[in-house]
Image (cartoon, coloured by chain):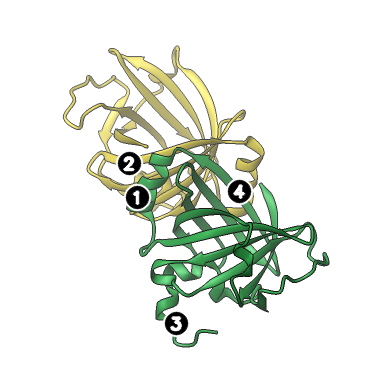
Chain colours: A green, B yellow
């Protein structure tokens, strides 16, 4: 169990790609409510089962367990809300802090979100030039929300 | 992932206790629907997270993972439907087959269920003398049902 403190931003350019390491995720939700989330994820070589409690500001309790890849693929297929979420995650360091940028594909094509994980809610950090509007408090940008409302169905994209 | 084939019976005496090994379980449900169950369990020394798919006859797909005991206790407290289920499980061998008998305590006090796990749905086995009516097909006797409808609230007990 760990406390996850995360801030999210829309992305305005592709500057994050240069020198970033890159991974492809496929993930789905067995449960995707506002107060609890049960997520299954594969990264091509490993599977993960994650339980998240309710969000409080930028904080959320998270329990994550590695599970066998065939189990994860089976759970995605049989137990998760469709369509699944597919994205490419770029990981990079900016001014001493690790950023993750998710480029969504499939039904969420066009959406790109940058996340930074913090030790404390009020921690200061510098914004990279390719970072736009903050969306931490906007539940539409939760991956669990996207599982039920894919980006290609949104009327107002910004 | 494994396929669980299980038959359940009410219990009519206490003959199963003799020579059985005994464990105390505390368990709860993050989700307890007819088509999916997410269970957290502790046995005093270990924690488990279990996902079950829909039941088909006596069969059900089950994914079970050991998790750290403090995580399991935390999940029981913070994420599971209350009241939790508490029971003592007796495990014994009868005529070459393993039986598990659950004596429920707390809000399910008075309920006692025997279970046998099979390799195949049509597998033959002999019934111990302390076994009564079969309840495999009765969803009231699912632990996930008891989480929402404890035995002490049932109008008709049999």
Q: Which residue is mark 1?
A: B156
Alpha carbon distance from label 2 to label 3: 35 Å
- Which label is found at residue B61? 2
* Same chain check for tags 4 and 2: no
Which mark is first along the chain, 2 or 1?
A: 2
Q: Which residue is mark 4?
A: A63
Is B48 situated above or below B52? above
* Same chain check for tags 2 and 3: no
Q: Picture coordinates of residue A22 (x, y %)? A: 55, 54
Identify the residue shown where x is 45% and y is 56%.
Answer: A27
Tag 4 secondary structure: strand
Whether the residues at callouts 1 and 2 have beta carbons within 8 Å, the answer is: no
Is A12 situated above or below B66? below
Q: Looking at the image, which residue sits at the far front?
A: A18
Alpha carbon distance from label 3 to label 1: 50 Å
* Same chain check for tags 3 and 4: yes
Tag 1 secondary structure: loop
Looking at the rendered image, the disc whose residue lies closer to the viewer, 2 or 3, is: 3
Is A57 situated above or below B50? below
Residue B79 relative to residue A118: left or right: left
């Amino acid at each position: 169990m760990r406390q996850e403190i995360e801030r999210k931003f829309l992305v305005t350019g592709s500057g994050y790609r240069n020198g970033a390491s890159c991974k492809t995720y496929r993930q789905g939700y067995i449960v995707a409510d506002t107060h609890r989330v049960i997520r299954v994820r594969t990264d091509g070589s490993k599977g993960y089962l994650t339980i998240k409690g309710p969000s409080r500001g930028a904080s959320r309790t998270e329990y994550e367990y590695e599970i066998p890849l065939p189990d994860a693929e089976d759970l995605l297929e049989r137990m998760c809300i469709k369509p699944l979420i597919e994205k490419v995650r770029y990981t990079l360091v900016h001014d001493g802090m690790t950023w993750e940028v998710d480029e969504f594909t499939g039904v969420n094509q066009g959406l790109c979100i940058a996340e930074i994980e913090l030790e404390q809610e009020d921690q200061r950090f510098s914004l990279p030039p390719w970072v736009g509007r903050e969306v931490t408090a906007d539940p539409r940008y939760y991956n669990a929300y996207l599982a039920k409302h894919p980006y290609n169905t949104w009327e107002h994209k910004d």
